[in-house]
Image (tube, helix red, strand yellow):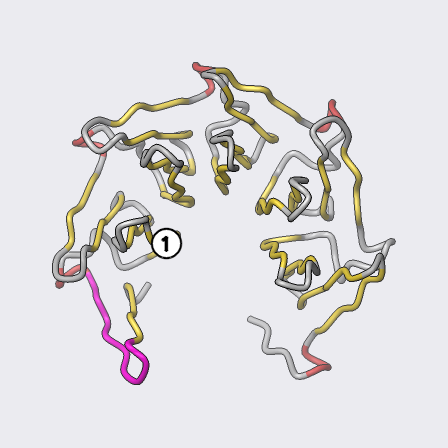
Amino acid sequence: GQGLAKLDGSKFTLYQQQNGLAHDQVMALLEDREGNIWIGTQGGGVSKFAGERFVNYTSAQGLARGIIHAVAQDSKGNFWFGSLGGGLCKFDGKKFTQLTIDQGLVNDQVEEILIDSEDRVYVATDGGLSILEGGRFRNYTIKDGLPANILKALRMDHQGQLWIGTFEGGAVRFDGKYFTRYSSDDGLLNDRISSLWEDRSRRIWFGTDQGVTVLEGGVFRSYNSKDGLGIG
């Protein structure tokens, strides 16, 4: 890892451990409502960058151990961190609260976090999907209709439906009751989905290790190296 780079419009500034960053391997980024940048790292915990200096949080302050793979903020200002190995961790600005399989999380290998407008916390893990609402988890796995348990990406669309990217199971749309699967048989480039996005035209984009696929009007179109897309 090479640290964190900031582009001011014309010039990059690189920040590394020697500048106060917790670790040079950066895994997740979030800009909070006050303009601070929160950085999840591989093994170094979390850094908060307020524009001039870093404030670092580790397991010594109560943060979950492991690689911080996801960072999110809810409407109350709480921060949520997802750890590969340490589960879910909530930070209210003063103390950390860990939520693991012991508290009902489906799996402690957290890949992604999404928080909706009602402050429901959606957690993609290597063992399925957890939804935290009202202090309780609802869990979904292949037994409930997911095509795979290893989940890599989450995105809420304009209709309030949840899109889930899985590892080797394609993509899934979840309306709160039923899962609808989309796979390479339907037009996805492949079934290993690492990222999701809905653009302003309400098209859904799927990032894979072989290129990208876009869903528009029920039709899939894919782009890869043959189209000039750099992959690697």
- Hey, which quadrant is residue 222 in on the image? bottom right
- Hey, which quadrant is residue 11 in on the image? bottom left
Residue depicted at 26% across the width and 32% down the height: 63
Mark 1 Cα shell of 10 Å, populated few (<14), some (14-19), many (≥20)? some
For label 1, the residue is 29
The number of callouts visible is 1
Residue range (magenta): 8-16
Q: Is residue 25 magenta?
A: no
Q: Amino acid at mark 1?
A: Leu
Q: Position of residue 54 (x, y in %)?
A: 15, 54
Mark 1 falls on what kind of element? strand
- Hey, which quadrant is residue 125 in on the image? top right
Q: Position of residue 42 (x, y in %)?
A: 33, 49
Image quadrant holding the N terminus, namely bottom left
Between residue 128 and residue 159, name the one nearer to us.
159
Residue depicted at 59% across the width and 54% down the height: 194
Between residue 105 and residue 48, name the one nearer to us.
48
Image quadrant holding the C terminus, namely bottom right
